[in-house]
Image: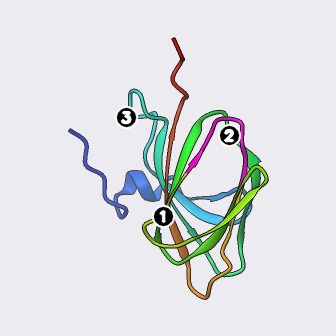
Amino acid sequence: MIVRNLKDKEVMDTTYIAHGGAVAQMILDRRTLEEIGFLAIATLAPGRIIEEHIDPMEEIYYVLSGSGEIQVDDEKKQVIPGDATWIPVGSRHSLLNNGQEDCVILVIASPAWLKA
């Protein structure tokens, strides 16, 4: 069993700027996981954007607090706490914090399953 807290040194040591906009940390990643790519937390300040990018794995952005406008390929939607957005492998995506408070998201990423 592995239990991680956001204040653990293993998490704090991974702090980085994600795609030009969010302060992010890896909670669990390939150092410990077997099948899942990673679980991260990201904080996006008001007016900031996680710039459009493409990842080699599918992801889920889950909004914990705040709000924003997520774009996946050519589709845009407003997201609020409790919303989960699935981002398919190879999709262009970005997140703009268009609210008045920090937008905090969990990011879950995993290699795509091979289809039989």
Q: Which mark is residue 74?
A: none
The residue pinned by badge 1 equals: 83
Few, some or many residues within 10 Å of mark 2 (<14, 14–19, 20+): some
As measured in the structure, the alpha-carbon distance from the residue carrying label 2 to the one carrying label 1 is: 20 Å
Residue at the spot x=68%, y=40% of the render?
Answer: 55
Image position of 66 with respect to 93: above or below: below
Q: Quadrant of the image for the N terminus?
A: top left
Circles 2 and 1 in contact, beta carbons < 8 Å = no
Q: Which mark is residue 32?
A: 3
Disc with the residue nearer the chain's start (3 vs 1) = 3
Which residue extends farthest left?
A: 1
Image position of 67 with respect to 19: above or below: below
As measured in the structure, the alpha-carbon distance from the residue carrying label 3 to the one carrying label 2 is: 21 Å
Circles 3 and 1 in contact, beta carbons < 8 Å = no
Image position of 83 with respect to 36: above or below: below
Could you tell me residue 31's position as x and y percent?
Answer: 43, 34
Q: Nearer the viewer, residue 19 or 98?
A: 98
Q: Which residues are magenta?
A: 86-93
